[in-house]
Image: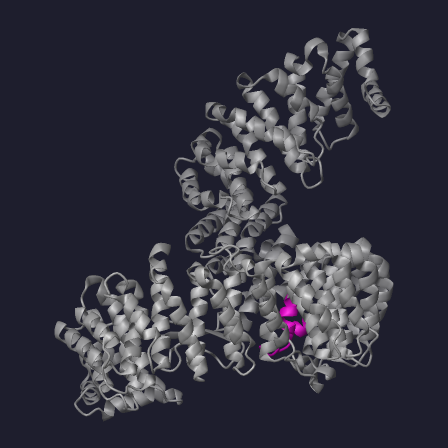
Amino acid sequence: MDPRAEADAAAVLGADPAALTALLADLTSPVNEARSRAEQQFHALRGSHPDALALSLAHLLLSPAHPSAPIAAVLLRRLIAPSSQAFVYPALSPATQSSLRALLLSAASAPALPRSVSRKLSDAVAELASYLLPANAWPDLLSFLYKSIDSQSSPPGLQESALNILARLASHLAAVFPNLHGLLLAALSHPSSADVRVAGLNAAISLIQSLPSAGARDQFQDLLPAMMRALAESLNCGNEGSAQEALEMMIELAGAEPRFLRRQLPDVVASMLQIAEAPGLEDGTRHLAVEFVVTLAEARERAPGMMRKLPRYVGRLFAVLMTMLLDVQDEPAWHAAVPEEEDAGETGSYVFAQECLDRLAIAVGGNTILPVAAELLPSFFSSEDWKRRHAALVTIAQIAEGSAKVMIKNLEQVVGMVLNSFQDPHPRVRWAAINAVGQLSTDLGPELQNQLHHVVLPALASAMDDVQNPRVQAHAASAILNFSENCRPDILTPYLDGIVGKLLLLLQTGNQMVQEAALTALASAADSSQEHFQKYYDAVMPYLKAILMNATDKSNRMLRAKSMECISLVGMAVGKQKFKDDAKQVMEVLMTLQGSQMEADDPITSYMLQAWARLCKCLGQDFLPYMSVVMPPLLQSAQLKPDVSVTSAGPEDEIGESDDEGVETITLGDKRIGIRTSLLEEKATACNMLCCYADELKEGFFPWIDQVTTTLAPLLKFYFHEEVRKAAISAMPELLRSAKLAIEKGQAQGRDKSYLKQLSDYIVPALVEVMHKEPEPQICASILESLNESIQVGDCIGTLAKTFKTYFLPFFDELSMYLTPMLGKDRTSEERRIAICIFDDVAEHCREAAIRYYDAYLPSLLEACTSENPDVRQAAVYGIGICAEFGGSAFRPHTGEALSRLYNVIKHPNALDLDNAMAYDNAVSALGKICQFHRDSIDASQVIPAWLSCLPLKNDLIEAKLVHEQLCAMLEKSERELLGHNNQYLPKIVSVFAEILCAGKDLATEQTSSKMVNLLRQLQTTLPPSVLASTWSSLQPQQQLALQSVLSS
């Protein structure tokens, strides 16, 4: 350290605290330069004089009234907290460590410690204790805590601090602290201090949560009445701040250990509802009481059905929430329909009640919530007060998701109630009715669309005529979007004349909210009706282009962005032929915009990225000339560095909150991290678009593969944003596919197959590496799927299988750590399907070498044959076929169960429904492989005719060709089990051949078809005329004609 720095350190850490006080003041200075200089000096002192710095801060705490004491406590905590990056305690000398522990307990014992210091000091003591207690290295702390809590003479402030430390250390102290039950009961019943009672509540809840078993927790059951009393007493003496702290702790208990409350549940819930119903209490207090009851209702997994046993309380809670919905004001800004005033008149209670109704309905389900709603809604609907009618409609919208199954059974009644309010005299009620229709269209679709389109769509079209209330018009247009998303084109098309006409009128109003809603609705109508929208194209497109070209004002940025979205969706709907002339004009506008300087928060940037991608989807290879314009800014957006600011968490700012709405902040240890979300959204959109271009342009994307791969591969580890990782994962096989096609079609700029190998050697290990680090199970599933596709596209499985001993199977062993848990019944269908598909590929390509995995995977495949999900069933039966083909003796013990499972799939009453047909064909194929490779393990005279009865296959055309070739091969050998006694199955075989040959090239290869014709000719010459005649007569007339034609040609 240079002499000047040494002198500065000596001054700050000397006997006179003035220099240290000045440094601490600068650390919280609003002036960046002063704060930055102070931080540098503090870090330097921590590195060069940790002992003196820690002791100086601790000495300041002995004067708790000193203005620098609060920040001294925060900074000392960082030095002695094991979770902090500034942790120096182990490096301190033993003498300093001992002094520091003594100083902390001495400071904590100080009488009349200010709250601003005591909380921070308690945190510091608890942090250091969490490091020392496992080694029993701070025995003085236990006696200090016990005396402070137990002694009648302890001042309330000291008791509170000691209880707060105990709460933080519950997991360390639960087993060693004497008389915990008695101490907590006394604290909860403290005669004079609400703060001590709340601290006792905090300690009790922490202790209960730290205990390892229900039995251990039950020993503290009798504390519950005292815990509820502590809460009530805080409210009774008007100390709502303490009461809110207590409620927050009770909510934590309800979420973590709901069963602890079960014995006294009615009393606890009744007390909470009493608080929620009390009109004289602050909104914040009432909200927390509601939150407690809703949290209990949501604790289904930990305490199934507990709240359903209290239907009366669900009714009371529901009434409280509906009353909170009345807290809405009829503000002029709402009627003006200004986009910036989207939520005009909505209060905190109104928004909170909406959210809770949604959560409550999801938690308790429609059978519990709808009877309660049915009791309350009629009086609200019939009220003279518009707010009550409004609340009824908002309630229906909010509970629809959780009650969907039951509501669908009463669709007409529910929707009828809502549609009656379309004529309400108050515009806010009409708006709420439209809002409810939109929400019901989402939550009860497609049943609502299928059954009630004839009443809902005309009602929405009529609501668009409400010219006096632009917000109602706008919302009616928005509801068209909700309705369209779950609607088949044939349902929507008959209404399009009226809807499109009204939306075009709305586009011509002067109100921006109405115009934006109309654009979104038109885009959705086009997207849902697809080619049926061609009829309206010539009327709609001029309006859309006019907005795109003329809405250049800053205030119209969103309007212009929505016009881009609408134009690109309309283009995709009507197709290239109809759209191509306008497309050129639109793309010229977009290119001009792309080259202009846009502000960072301009929504057009993100909308334009998506519009380009849709235009590419619409125009296909014709889009290639524009790629040189599109790609540079797209890559720039994908390469955006996250705008992350890391600052020290300030003394009063343990949970960082930012005033900037575009920034999310989190506090990790002693650092506050702020992330600008708008940049992340733009980055995610750009990454998705890159994936989309690779998918759409195939070999045409080749010139950008290297740049995009090096941009996206590092983003597989971009942990700031899930969507960025998902896009990067999805893009990997698409990039390989583009490269492969370009090489095959001679468009790879001179590159050959070695380039594909080089690319897959880069991509596959990158995907394997991120498997280890990915925190989200669903994204792990996506990585596996992407990996599987990448291996197949890169033709790695075949190559790797040949050298499996050195490379591939060890790699699969590694993957199996992630795959086998995904086979569990508790996983989603998609996760199970992916895991089974990857095993199927390994079994298929590695053949005998993969037999070692059969024990781990085959039982899951057999079990998955009964899955309700047809894609899982298909993957499972396909895998059984592969194992039957290549498994040899390893498969034999499973033959009986495999037959039984396959029969179940084949004989299911709905086996040939469209959803199940692929699984059916694969099950029949697997049955054929068992017949072919394991005939000695089965009763062939039963199984082969059963297999034959399922032919021909018509859905999975790949399996169909293989199975029909197998049938030919068996007939060529004149297998007796196939022909049956006295050729009894021959008519069936000829009938199958006839169907296959009638279908042209779909069901058999040319080679197989030619074999079939030869076999039929042989039968003509070798069979006795009587057998031939009876076989022929069993065919349908059109089959006879087809065969005659084939055999005579």
Quick check: 669 left or right of 699? left
Whether residue 805 appears in this view of the structure is: yes
| Magenta-colored span | 590-609
Give the position of the N terminus as an image quadrant.
bottom left
Query: Which of 484/1046 is in front?
Result: 484
Image location of residue 452, percent across then percent down: 80, 58
Image location of residue 67, percent across then percent down: 30, 91
Instruction: Indicate the quadrant where residue 810 lies.
Output: top left
Residue 18 vs 535, above or below: the answer is: below
Query: Count the marks: how many?
Result: 0
Instruction: Indicate the quadrant where residue 168 lies.
Output: bottom left
Report the predominant secondary structure element of the magenta stretch.
helix
Query: Which of 607/459 is in front?
Result: 459
Quick check: 366 left or right of 427? left
Image location of residue 1039, percent across then percent down: 82, 24
Give the position of the C terminus as an image quadrant.
top right
Please tell me whether residue 594 belongs to the stretch shown in magenta.
yes
